[in-house]
Amino acid sequence: MVQTLEKSAELIEYSKNDPVMSTRLAGVCDLVAAEACYHPPCMIRFERQCKQKQPSFAEEGQRDFCLNQLCFYLIRGLGRGHVYDMVDVRSTYEKMCSDMA
Ligand SMILES: [Zn+2]
């Protein structure tokens, strides 16, 4: 049984990167209230898999989107004679990604 809200939030967060779990937990926001149960060995395996997982497609997509936008602005700016500092460009990119998240 999921007994703490902390555990519930963690599992819901993990499930976003797992197609099966995200389908099963669709619309569930509190596993304690939902009285969710699990097999301890399966839970350990699930958590291990999730911790090893690469960023989700959504995160990758957001990064690609930010990079495309950044390139668009840079190319347009360069065409108008602007000069960019790579450190600023990088921090702008990081900020765009974190704003998207
Ligand atoms: Zn099981």
Image: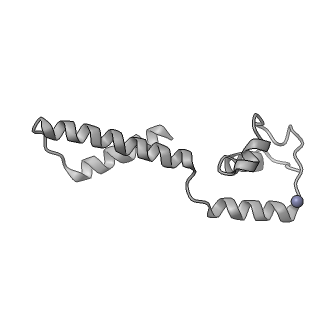
Quarter of the figure with residue 38? bottom right
Is residue 76 positioned above or below 53 on the image?
above
Left of 60 or right of it: where is 12?
right
Is residue 53 positioned above or below 92 on the image?
below
The answer, for residue 80, to whether it is visible in the render is: yes
- On the image, the x and y values in percent for residue 50 come to 67, 59
- On the image, the x and y values in percent for residue 2 come to 85, 49
The answer, for residue 6, to whether it is visible in the render is: no
The residue lying at 76 percent from left, 50 percent from top is 7
Which corner quadrant of the figure contains ligand 1? Answer: bottom right
The residue lying at 76 percent from left, 34 percent from top is 27
Q: Residue lying farthest left?
A: 81
- On the image, the x and y values in percent for residue 71 come to 28, 43
* Number of on-image labels: 0
Left of 38 or right of it: where is 12?
left
Q: How is the image coloured?
A: one colour
Is residue 61 positioned above or below 28 on the image?
below
Left of 65 or right of it: where is 89?
left
Left of 73 or right of it: where is 7?
right
Quarter of the figure with residue 96? top left
- On the image, the x and y values in percent for residue 83 come to 13, 44
The residue lying at 79 percent from left, 43 percent from top is 24
Camera-side residue: 14 or 24? 24
The residue lying at 42 percent from left, 46 percent from top is 64
